[in-house]
Amino acid sequence: MEFDINAFVKSLDMDHIAVALVSIGLIILILSYWGLWHMFKKMGMAGWKCLIPIYSTWIVFKIIWKGSVFWFQLSIGIMVNLLPASDIPYKTLIGIIGIAVDAVITLMLHYKLSRAFGHGIPFTLGLCICPPLFYMILGLGSSTFELSAPKKLRMTTITLKGQEYPIHNFDHINKLMRSDKKAAAVVELSKITGMTYEESVEILDKWYLYYY
């Protein structure tokens, strides 16, 4: 029997198909943000922050890379979108370069995010190809946030006023700082070190805990 594609298309209930596609899209969106919520919590941030467009991306840049790179990428995106369509070669070239730079920054961000959770290049490609699924893996799976300090600051102990402390003692302080709870971080540092509140404030204002 010959298959009649036209008859098959006409037999489809397009309203039901549209409802099914919208439902699938909503499910994927909800699962993606569910994974992001838990991923943010693993990074020491409040989960609800993943729900705020632009701000949530800036947070990820700030923690695993640099906030300045985010503003650079945002500027490129605005420039490319505002660039009028034109047959003038240099405008077309600027647009192509802008899109390429944006793609490279996004790829690097995914790589740094993958590395921060202990994964490598294959996981980076997964984040690029299917972000919702891999956000779920990061947030709901067994992956742990392992972002370390810059090489020059990688250490097992921290020395303050001649006294050495295990670096893991400061994990909770890092989480507080990432959650914009500086006052609580100061109190925690005072408890660990026995320093005064003012001394702890001075250290947190200068120290790498902002970037750890």
Image: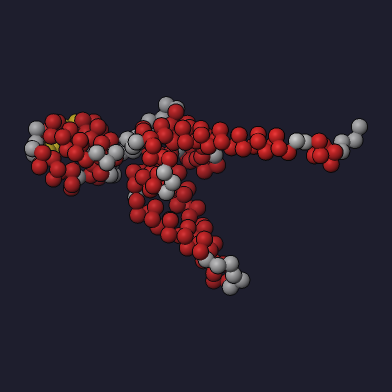
**Residue drawn at x 17%, y 33% as measured from the top left:** 188
Q: Is residue 138 something that shows in the picture?
A: no
Number of residue marks: 0
Is 64 positioned to the left or the right of 132 in the image?
A: left
Extreme residue toward the bottom, this view: 88
In which quadrant of the rendered image does the C terminus lie?
top left
Q: Residue furthest top?
A: 142
Q: Residue 135 appears at what percent x and percent y?
A: 47, 36
Q: Where is residue 8 in the image (x, y as percent from the top left)?
A: 82, 37
Residue 84 in which image quadrant: bottom right
Q: Quadrant of residue 4?
A: top right
Judge by depth and name the residue closer to the eye, 73 or 100.
73
Quarter of the image where the N terminus is located:
top right
State the scheme by which the image is colored: secondary structure
Instruction: Examine the rendered structure and indicate whether residue 112 appears above or below residue 104.
Output: above
Which residue is painted at 25% across and 32% down in the image?
A: 172
Residue 186 location, quadrant: top left
Q: Where is residue 187 in the image (x, y as percent from the top left)?
A: 16, 34
Is 1 left or right of 202, judged from the image as shown?
Answer: right
- In the picture as drawn, the residue positioned furthest to the front comes out as 15
Seen in the image, is 201 located left or right of residue 101? left
Q: Residue at x 13, y 45 (%)?
A: 202
Residue 49: give x, y in percent of width and height.
38, 40
Up the image or down, 143 lies above or below 116; here it is above
Is residue 26 visible in this depiction of the protein? yes
Residue visible at 53% across and 37% down?
A: 29
